[in-house]
Image (cartoon, helix red, strand yellow):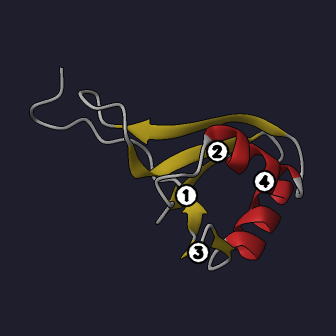
Amino acid sequence: MNIYVGNLNYKVRENDLNEVFSEFGEVHSVKIITDKYTGKSKGFGFVVMEDDSEARNAINNLNGRLLEDRELIVNEARPKKEGFFRQ
């Protein structure tokens, strides 16, 4: 399952998210979205967990949890839409 993680403190790194989500099961991958020009975090990212029950448990337990003084927004990621301007 692909999990959206929002409201991230800009100091949070991918290994930090990996550690937090690993409490609930095996993490396949973690990606924090960054600005392509500055390389700075945009404050959200995605975590992929193969086991759906572990992923749902992580979502239920981590949504609203504090990480670096910010309340996480955690839910199942929606499928990516193809936008008009995307190439």
Element under disc 2:
strand
**24 displayed left or right of 74:** right
Please tell me which residue is depicted at 89% across the width and 50% down the height of the picture.
25
Element under disc 1:
strand
Between discs 1 and 3, the one toward the N terminus: 1
Which numbered disc covers residue 69? 3
Which numbered disc covers residue 21? 4
Three-letter amino acid code of the residue under disc 3: Asp
Element under disc 4:
helix
Which residue is under mark 1? 5
Three-letter amino acid code of the residue under disc 4: Phe
User: How far apart are the two marked residues, 4 and 3, measured between alpha carbons?
Assistant: 17 Å
Please tell me which residue is depicted at 55% across the width and 58% down the height of the picture.
5
Judge by depth and name the residue closer to the eye, 33 or 87. 33
Is residue 51 positioned above or below 84 on the image? below
Label 1 Cα crowd, 10 Å radius (few <14 / some 14-19 / many 20+): many
Residues marked 2 and 1 touching at CB (< 8 Å): yes
User: How far apart are the two marked residues, 3 and 2, measured between alpha carbons?
Assistant: 20 Å
Label 2 Cα crowd, 10 Å radius (few <14 / some 14-19 / many 20+): many
**44 displayed left or right of 22:** left
Residues marked 2 and 4 touching at CB (< 8 Å): yes
Between discs 3 and 2, the one toward the N terminus: 2
Q: Residue farthest to the left? A: 85
Q: Position of residue 73 (x, y in %)?
A: 54, 70
User: How far apart are the two marked residues, 2 and 4, measured between alpha carbons?
Assistant: 8 Å
The number of discs equals 4
Q: Position of residue 52 (x, y in %)?
A: 79, 52
